Image: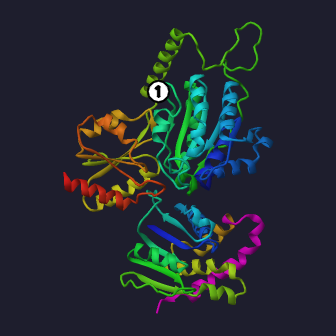
Amino acid sequence: MTEEIIIAGFGGQGILSMGKIMAYSGVMQDMEVSWMPSYGPEMRGGTANVTVILSDEKISSPILRQFDTAIILNQQSLDKFEDSVKKGGILIYDSHGIVRHPERTDISLYCISAVEEAAKMNNPRTFNMIVLGAYLRIRPVLTLENVVKGLGKSLPERYHYLIPDNEKALRRGMEIIGPAS
Amino acid sequence: MERELRLMKGNEAVAEAAIRAGTDGYFGYPITPQSEIVEYLMEANPAETTGMVVLQAESEIAAINMVYGGAGCGKKVMTTSSSPGISLMQEGITYIAGAELPCLIVNIVRGGPGLGTIQPAQSDYFQAVKGGGHGDYHLIVLAPASVQEMADFVELGFELAFRYRNPVMMLSDGALGQMMEKVYLNPQKERSGISPDWATTGKPPGRERNIITSLELDSAKQELFNLKLIEKYNEIREKEVRFEEYQCEDAEYLFVAYGTSARICQKSVQLARNEGIRAGLLRPVTLFPFPEKQISRLAEKVKIILSVEMSAGQMIEDVILAVGGKVPVFHFGRMGGMVQTPEEVLDFLKLKIKEA
């Protein structure tokens, strides 16, 4: 099994951390992992993206043009990466701020209102974990148990008190995800 | 030997491996995309554990001269930088090579020329392999292709540097520096505390002074020294070539690529073979010495060779020399911080197959 994922959105949305948590979770699950961030001027505002690969085999290229899954958190990234999903792949996007929805018919589209949902839960910063939960429901490549362990590895100890809230957000994402209308 | 598993950026792996290798001193100056090395070492503060000195110099020029000094004392010393910073260090590097001193220099290459870009590139091949500084000298050049090798080549680099009394460069790039992968780290080694007999650590009674210099005004003596260097480089060529072959046994088409480009080409080989195109990859692990015999041997049985590098085509010159006109050799690669995808490499190969 090899899962090639792109996560893209605004800098500051927790894109790189979401990828990092997935990579750590992959390690917890005894998988090979690679985490390749965009580290250019986009990190200083604008768009950010990270390529995460989870695999049972040794990983070849950390740099990819086509992905099994795209997790998209803003309009620019949707415009940029919609065509990069492999045929039969998955595109998950957050509806917040999206004016042009994806149009492909040869991939599975999922829309989630994670920004709204996180606001309802009074914890807007866990919105990326709602998205991750949704992804894991659609593509259960990582167990929730290993993702919680991954969170523990990824977050510095002084932030470990945030783990329960993040786990709640992961579970919420798993509950609310459905196919895009 | 129990190795500790971590998930790390290539830059962090270099820093942690440096501490664990029992390095005596690190001298550097921050520059993107390798600043994590300095940051990691500053935070780890190994002065309190192993006694390793970590110093942020006032410039790259100061840093390399601190390395020169430390190396002259027989210490295990290193520096790291990225392309423009490595250019500033070239005077120091040729002096270190001329004085026959061991040290490790890590270049996390970014696009150039000039200040260029902060994104990954492989456009410093000429500088690392062909000189960079003045005079007839060679660095031993190691080209890691994974975070694991970024860590492993710190120890290997020091080992080779001391064995041959020669500066070693680890030629990496921004992608390897910034990406995270699993890495198994060696246990902590103690710093040796013993200096080699050539080191300038104070003259005890009963032996001649040790002199470390790259200056010899008597040309006849300087020529003898040049001949001695050539002998050393030839020994290195003989004994230290390292390379990796991937699916070369039945290959009709060969990629030659190092570092990040080698990882990309590995995927191109897989994609090609899915389509029935028998591609293979030769990855030079050492760039000096270059695996010319291995490439020459493969040139006997393949139809086309592509030198894939994130540059305008630099390593290709060594590939062409090794191939000796037996088969056509083409360059492919993106520049300026752009990175070629596995599909782009395959598309280019298909184009060349069609044209042939």
Q: Position of residue B92 (x, y in %)?
A: 61, 31
Q: Residue at x 46, y 60 (%)?
A: A63
Q: Residue at x 71, y 79 (%)?
A: A165
Q: Please give the residue where the numbered disc 1 appears in the rendered image.
A: B236
Residue drawn at 72 percent across, 77 percent down: A164
Relative height, residue A68 to residue B349 (above, below): below
- Pointer 1 local density, CA inside 10 Å: few below 14, some 14–19, many at least 20: some
In this view, the residue in front, B282 or B20, is: B282
Q: How many marks?
A: 1
Q: Chain of mark 1?
A: B
- Looking at this rendering, what residue extends furthest in the bottom direction? A181
Q: Is residue B351 above or below residue B246?
A: below
Q: Is residue B199 left or right of residue B146?
A: right
Q: Is residue B203 visible?
A: yes
B209 vs A42, nearest the viewer: A42
Residue placed at 66% from the left, 69% from the top?
A151
Determine whether, in the image, residue B343 is placed left or right of residue B206.
Answer: left
Main secondary-structure element of the magenta-colored stretch: helix
> The disc labelled 1 sits on which kind of residue?
Ile
Q: In what element is the residue under mark 1?
A: helix
Q: Position of residue B279 (x, y in %)?
A: 29, 52
The percent coordinates of residue B194 (x first, y second) are 71, 25
B128 sits to left or right of B326:
right
Magenta region: A154-181
Please tell me whether residue B161 belongs to the stretch shown in magenta.
no
B16 relative to A31, above or below? above
Is the N terminus of chain A in the top left, top right, bottom left or bottom right quadrant? bottom left
**Residue extending furthest right?**
B48
Location of residue B22 in the rendering, given as x and y in whole percent from the top left corner = 69, 37
